[in-house]
């Protein structure tokens, strides 16, 4: 029988996954900011870039708490979400619906991150890993606040603007 793997192994594996995701999101956010037409949406992406830098630093602290070197593990889920967003950028570039689409793509990323941070936080508490619970909670709260801010932008501006364009075919 192969070596049995427990929650500590799963925690480390999932930590590597979100580390990969956050580092790739750092590369994507400037592209989203540049593509957005709304100043408020540009500012939201810029703000989240700074938060994501802090989240990467916190993840590196968690790696240190478990005495592991920060290393990524390819995350097919985040790669797929980012690829889907890239397609949306191509398909809707220059259109009224682009900002609504960018918000939709960004929220898919946020929801993925929320699930990962929520899970890691619970496991960190169960495994009693130093202050990992607090570090992961801070990131979870930032991701949730970003999701709420994006919803507000969608509801107050982007979706209504996109809805004004009538179907012609």
Image (spheres, rainbow, N blue to C red):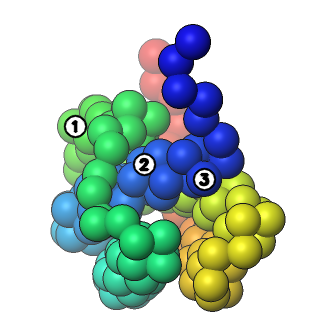
Residue 79 spot, x, y in % from top left: 33, 38
Mark 2: secondary structure: helix
Q: Is residue 6 visible?
A: yes
Q: Residue at x 65, y 41 (%)?
A: 6
Instruction: State the image coordinates of residue 87 (x, y, percent, origin top left).
Output: 28, 33
Query: From the viewer's perspective, is residue 108 above or below residue 63?
Result: above
Question: Label 2: few (<14), some or many (≥20) within 10 Å?
Answer: many
Q: Nearer the viewer, residue 87 or 78?
A: 78
Residue neighbourhood size for the residue with mark 1, other residues' Cα within 10 Å, grouped as few (<14), some (14–19), many (≥20)? few
Q: Is residue 130 left or right of residue 21?
A: right
Label 1 sits on residue:
90
Q: CA distance from mark 3 to mark 1?
A: 41 Å
Asked whether disc 3 touches disc 1, contact meaning CB atoms under 8 Å apart, the reply is no
In the picture of the structure, the residue carrying the numbered disc 2 is 17
Quarter of the image that includes the N terminus? top right
- 144 w.r.t. 7: above or below: below
Residue 72: percent from the left, percent from the top? 29, 52
11 and 67: which is toward the camera? 67
Q: Is residue 44 visible?
A: no
Residue under the image location 35 percent in, 82 percent down = 57
Determine the CA span between mark 2 and mark 3.
Answer: 14 Å
Q: CA distance from mark 1 to mark 2?
A: 27 Å
Q: Residue at x 48, y 78 (%)?
A: 65
Q: Residue at x 20, y 62 (%)?
A: 27
Numbered disc 1: secondary structure: helix
> Which-is-in-front pick, marks 1 and 2?
2
Residue 8 - label: 3
């Amino acid at each position: 029988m192969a070596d049995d793997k427990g929650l500590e192994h799963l925690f480390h594996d999932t930590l590597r996954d979100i580390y990969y995701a956050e580092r790739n999101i750092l590369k994507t956010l400037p592209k989203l900011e540049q593509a957005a037409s709304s100043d408020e949406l540009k500012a939201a992406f810029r703000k989240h870039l700074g938060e994501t830098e802090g989240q990467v630093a916190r993840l590196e602290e968690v790696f240190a708490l478990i005495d592991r070197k920060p290393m990524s593990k390819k995350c097919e889920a985040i790669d797929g979400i980012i690829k889907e967003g890239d397609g949306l950028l191509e398909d809707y570039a220059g259109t009224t619906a682009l900002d609504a689409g960018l918000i939709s793509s960004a929220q898919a990323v946020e929801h993925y991150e929320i699930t990962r941070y929520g899970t890691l936080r619970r496991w960190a508490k169960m495994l009693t890993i130093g202050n990992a619970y607090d570090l992961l909670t801070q990131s979870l709260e930032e991701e949730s606040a970003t999701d709420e801010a994006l919803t507000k932008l969608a509801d107050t501006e982007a979706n209504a603007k996109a809805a004004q364009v009538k179907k012609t075919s």
